[in-house]
Structure formats: structure tokens, C-alpha cells
């Protein structure tokens, strides 16, 4: 017989209660053994008497299927490459292998629900059966991870994945897959940036130091001033310049930080001159990891 594009030979026929049968009549619900490959729901099975004709038909169908799959894969890779180059969408490409079509469809639907305007799961290939070398090659070419559900990984695929650095993850609970992929997607989200003011200082006078340039003789009025952090220079409530504090001195010595109430010399990258009464505001920006709602 032939089913879809794979040939097979009937090894046994059983009814719904496990009794072996010699023949199956129209409308009988039976279990067949003898498939070369796992069939999909909806595949048609046809009995062919001549084995020569059977092999010829199977080979032609398999050739056609490979050509179609190659076209599909090329399109998927091109589409994914375009999205990444645009930079408008961050994509996590995934290959799904499962034990049955129902598992694959349920897994795909649950993963796609995680998509939002910033990040996207792209299922570039999904099929029934164990993880094979061809899956690993596709994953390597598209920087994808392979998600297997209730399937095994062939020994050659394991070796290929180890050499290529392809991540293969096998699960038996759908929610475990969704939770882990969700964490991966959250890592692709742009983090929220939160600014906090560390300290403020009032400029009292300007000094010129050889090999450094002008620095602001200042008094810290709030918090703490630290070297190598961001700062803004305000004059009459107007922002003059923004840059890092490249020089921080306490008397003639370099200092890492100066606390409230103490005097110091402050040099900001890009600042040419300081005036009495200028306000220096030191701040830092922290990145906070976002989560998918």
C-alpha cells in the first residue's frame, strides 16, 4: 500500500478491541501495522498490488515533497532574514518536532499567543517524528532552537547539534515549553530605563588645572557625587551640557566619590567653562528587565 508519499506493507490489521482481522471492509475502524513513516491525520491510503509500481509512485511523490519543502524553507528563511534586518521585530525562530499532529498544533498555538509588537516567535518548520540531522542543519542555518515534544533525538542529530552549537530541548509537558520560551522572549524585550538622581552640587568658582582644563570648584548639596557617572550642568535652569564626570578631586587628590556637605573639584566631559551658581546634577540610568504580561 501507499500512504501519502511513503510505501508500506500490511503486517497486521486489528479492530477497536484489539482482535486481529484478515481484511478490513468499508467503514471499519482498524489499526494497521507496517507503515514506513508516521502518517498524518487525513492522509489517504491506497492498496497497490504491484510492488514495482508502488516503489515508483513512492519515489516520485517523495521527490515532489522534497522540492515543495525546499521552497517553503527558503521562503521562511528569507522572510525571517528580512524581519531581522529591518530591526522592527525581534524574532525567536523555532523548529517544532512532536509525536502527533495534535501535540504540534497545540504547542504552536500556545507559543504564538506569546507574540507582541516587539518580539515574535517564528515557527519555521514543524513535523511529526524524531529530531533528525536535517532539523539540526535547518536550525543552524536559521539560528533557531529545536523544540521536541515526546520525541527522541537521533544519535547523528545529537552529534551534529553538539558540533554546530544548536540548542535542542525535549519536553513532555506543553506548559513547560511555554514557560521556558516565555523567559527567552522576555530576554529579547527592550528593558525599561529608569533614571535616579544620585547627587547635586553648586559651583562656587572655576579653576584651571594643567593637562585637564577647567574644573568646577563645587559644594555637594545633596546625595553623593561619583566619578565616571553621568551628569548635567544647568545654568539659570537651562541645560548647558550633559556628559560623564571625568575628573573628581578632593583638594589636590583624586576621589572616587564626594558626599553631601563636602567641597570638591568636578570636571564634566565637554564642559568648557563653569560659572558661580551653576548646578551639577549627577544621575544614573538603570535597566529593568521587562516581562510579558
Image (cartoon, rainbow, N blue to C red):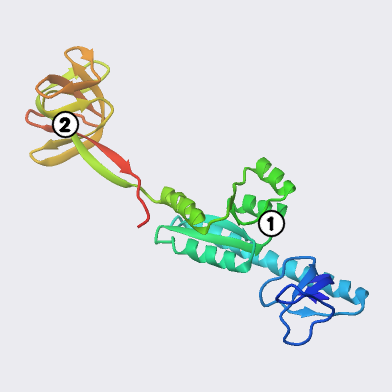
Give neighbour class at mark 2: few <14, some 14-19, many 20+ (Cα, 10 Å): many
> Who is closer to the viewer here, 240 or 78?
78
Task: Quickly name the residue at label 1.
Answer: 130
Instruction: From the top left corner, tell me how far across and down residue 290 is, in percent.
Output: 35, 49
Location of residue 241 (image quadrant): top left
291 vs 61, left or right, is: left
Q: Any mark on residue 27, and which? A: none
| Residue 274 visible to the viewer | no
Which residue is drawn at the image coordinates 48% and 51% (left, top)? 180
Quarter that holds the N terminus? bottom right
Could you tell me how far apart the alpha carbons at marks 2 and 1 are, in whole angstroms?
60 Å
Instruction: From the top left corner, tell me how far across and down residue 131 is, in percent.
Output: 68, 54
Q: Is residue 61 above or below residue 220?
A: below
> Who is closer to the viewer here, 39 or 240?
39
Looking at the image, is mark 2 or mark 1 nearer the viewer? 1
Which residue is drawn at the image coordinates 68% and 41% (left, top)? 163
Quarter that holds the C terminus? bottom left
State the SS at label 2.
strand
Task: Quickly name the residue at label 2.
Answer: 199
Instruction: From the top left corner, tell me how far across and down residue 259 is, in percent.
Output: 15, 23
| Residue 45 visible to the viewer | yes
Location of residue 283 (image quadrant): top left
Amino acid at each position: 500500500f501507499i500512504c501519502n508519499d511513503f510505501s508500506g506493507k500490511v503486517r497486521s490489521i486489528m479492530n477497536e478491541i484489539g482482535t486481529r482481522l484478515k481484511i478490513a471492509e468499508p467503514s471499519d475502524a482498524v489499526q494497521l501495522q507496517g507503515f514506513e513513516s508516521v502518517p498524518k491525520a487525513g492522509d489517504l491510503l491506497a492498496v497497490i498490488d504491484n510492488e514495482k509500481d508502488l516503489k515508483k509512485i513512492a519515489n516520485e511523490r517523495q521527490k515532489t515533497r522534497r522540492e515543495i519543502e525546499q521552497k517553503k524553507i527558503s521562503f521562511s528563511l528569507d522572510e525571517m532574514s528580512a524581519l531581522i534586518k529591518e530591526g522592527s521585530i525581534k524574532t525567536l525562530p523555532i523548529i517544532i518536532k512532536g509525536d502527533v499532529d495534535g501535540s504540534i498544533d497545540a504547542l504552536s498555538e500556545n507559543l504564538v499567543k506569546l507574540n507582541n509588537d516587539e518580539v515574535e516567535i517564528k515557527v519555521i518548520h514543524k513535523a511529526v517524528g524524531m529530531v533528525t540531522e536535517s532539523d539540526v542543519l535547518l536550525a543552524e542555518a536559521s539560528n533557531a532552537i529545536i523544540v521536541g515534544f515526546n520525541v527522541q533525538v537521533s544519535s547523528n542529530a545529537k552529534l551534529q547539534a553538539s558540533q554546530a552549537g544548536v540548542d535542542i530541548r525535549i519536553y513532555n509537558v506543553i506548559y513547560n515549553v511555554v514557560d521556558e520560551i516565555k523567559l527567552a522572549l522576555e530576554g529579547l524585550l527592550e528593558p525599561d530605563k529608569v533614571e535616579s538622581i544620585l547627587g547635586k552640587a553648586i559651583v562656587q568658582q572655576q579653576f584651571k588645572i594643567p593637562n585637564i582644563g577647567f574644573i568646577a570648584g563645587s559644594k555637594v548639596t545633596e546625595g553623593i557625587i561619583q566619578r565616571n557617572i553621568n551628569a548635567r550642568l544647568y545654568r539659570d535652569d537651562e541645560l548647558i551640557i550633559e556628559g560623564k564626570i571625568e575628573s573628581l578631586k578632593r583638594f589636590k587628590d583624586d576621589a572616587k566619590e564626594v558626599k553631601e556637605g563636602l567641597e570638591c573639584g568636578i570636571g564634566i566631559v565637554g564642559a568648557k567653562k563653569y560659572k558661580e551658581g551653576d548646578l551639577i546634577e549627577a544621575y544614573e540610568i538603570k535597566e529593568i528587565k521587562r516581562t510579558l504580561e
